[in-house]
Amino acid sequence: MRPRFAAAVVVATTAAIALSGCTKKNESTDTAASGDAGSKTYKVAFVPKLQGVPYFEAMNAGGKEAAAALGNVEWLYQGPTQADAAAQADIVRSYIQQKV
């Protein structure tokens, strides 16, 4: 299997699993089935260890494709330009503050 295709499959599967668990605590499944959940846009963020690495860039491309195919997903991609765990943690904290 080609790495780019494999990355797209992994990202699409992860997004599908993550989105299937996105319900409110007391929300019934009837509300989700009626189409109310389809009008919401979900933000999915990917924070690589380092930008510019072909592996992570392939995952970004796959994530963009999966988000476009799903339609109600906003794909966010940001990573440090140098391999720095502290910079990566800062990006994750920023996304958490934005409620991604």
Image (cartoon, rainbow, N blue to C red):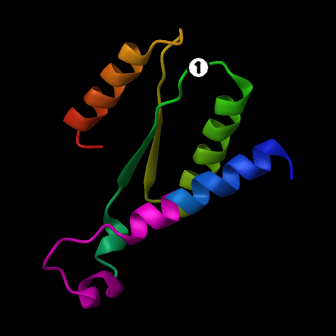
Tell me, yes or no, if residue 52 can be seen here.
yes
- Indicate whether residue 21 is drawn in magenta: yes
x, y percentage for residue 41? 35, 56
What residue is drawn where x is 41% and y is 71%?
20
Asked where in the image residue 42 lies, by quadrant, the reply is: bottom left
Residue 5 drawn above or below residue 59: below
What residue is drawn where x is 20% and y is 34%?
97
Query: In the current view of this chain or complex, which residue is farthest to the bottom?
Result: 30
Left or right: residue 37 versus residue 8 is left
x, y percentage for residue 82? 53, 8
Tell me, yes or no, if residue 69 can be seen here.
no
Asked where in the image residue 13 lies, by quadrant, the reply is: bottom right
Q: Secondary structure at mark 1?
A: loop
Q: Give 12 or 68, whichever is nearer the viewer.
A: 12
Query: In the current view of this chain or complex, which residue is farthest to the front?
Result: 85
The quadrant of the image that shows the C terminus is top left
Residue 5 drawn above or below residue 80: below
x, y percentage for residue 10? 64, 54
What residue is drawn where x is 23% and y is 43%?
99
x, y percentage for residue 38? 37, 71
Q: Give 1 or 12, whichever is nearer the viewer.
A: 1
Query: In the current view of this chain or complex, which residue is farthest to the left?
Result: 26
Q: How many marks?
A: 1
Asked where in the image residue 32 lies, by quadrant, the reply is: bottom left
Left or right: residue 96 versus residue 87 is left
Q: Residues within 10 Å of mark 1 (few under 14, many from 20)?
A: some
Query: Which residue is disc 1 drawn over?
Result: 51
Query: In the current view of this chain or complex, which residue is farthest to the right?
Result: 1
Residue 83 drawn above or below residue 44: above
Q: Which residues are magenta?
A: 15-34
Disc 1 residue type (three-letter): Gln
- Indicate whether residue 40 is drawn in magenta: no
